[in-house]
Image: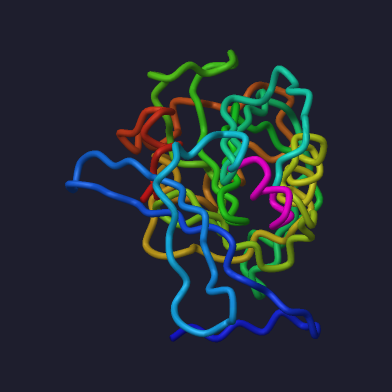
Amino acid sequence: MIHTDLGQQRQYKLQNVVCLYGDGSQAFATLHEVDHPFNGQGQPKLRPAQALTTAFLHGLQDQLGVRQSVEIFTEQVLARTPEMVAWYVPAAHRAMFFKTGGTPLDAYSGKRFPHPGLVFKLANNILSVRAVATNVRPSAATKLFAAPYYNIYANGSVCTGSMRTPDRSTVDVLDAWVAGFFASAFSHVAGVVKVTTVKGGYPALVKLIAGSKFAFPVRTLVDVRQSLTEFLRDGDL
């Protein structure tokens, strides 16, 4: 038995039942209206099956408050589902901030650095990021690389730490997610993850590119053997 607290005193009555049928590889669903006993005694009965229409599903989304509003996509958006949005950020020069507990990296906090092109993914409110080696909008088969930063796990997900995050994931706030990422304090290695090919690791990379007016040296990126499509599908059920 499932108990649900709806937060208010209202009477709810079973209206429809959706039956899901499957064989492990394919599935289909039917919709049944419910007949209730006239005197309130006995069990409700299902009416004959009807086709499950998109109109019914849209109406259900409206009632549950999860209907997705119309969004105008910008060129940076790479993919969008109800649970996920991914977008591309071209190579640029940006400031970075470090708070590593007194390591030499802290001396570079606030300086400007060149950054490679990046692919951000926001899925179920988890931010992930990968790098690309070219400064063009990536396609489905584009090879991805580890984002050359602290606070990033092996699968690309971000340890948000001090990051200030927007309260939604609509396309109009994607720039705010990026701004929050770079305004946060990069503080630690998130797991045993190689983020650069530079001898001496990430601190050596930071020293190499701090204040540089040139493009990010993409030869220092670490290949994660993952395409854009694979990255976007990672974590799918």
User: Most extreme residue toward the left, as rendered?
Assistant: 23
Q: Is residue 230 left or right of residue 53?
A: left
Front-most of 51 and 96?
51
- Residue 106 or 43: which is nearer the viewer? 43
In the rendering, at what x and y percent does residue 176 appear?
81, 44
The quadrant of the rendering that contains the N terminus is: bottom left
Identified at 34% across, 33% down, the residue is 226
Q: Is residue 36 above or below residue 32?
A: below
Task: Using residue 132 as the reference point, say whether residue 89 is left or right of it.
Answer: right
Where are the magenta residues, as a range? Answer: 57-66
Residue in view at x 42 percent, y 30 percent: 144
Magenta span: helix, strand or loop, mainly? helix
Where 75 falls versus 17 (above or below)? above
x%, y% of residue 145?
A: 43, 34
Image spot of residue 155 (x, y percent): 41, 51
- Say left or right for 67 vs 172: left
The answer to which quarter of the image holds residue 103 is: bottom right
Q: Residue at x 77, y 83 (%)?
A: 7
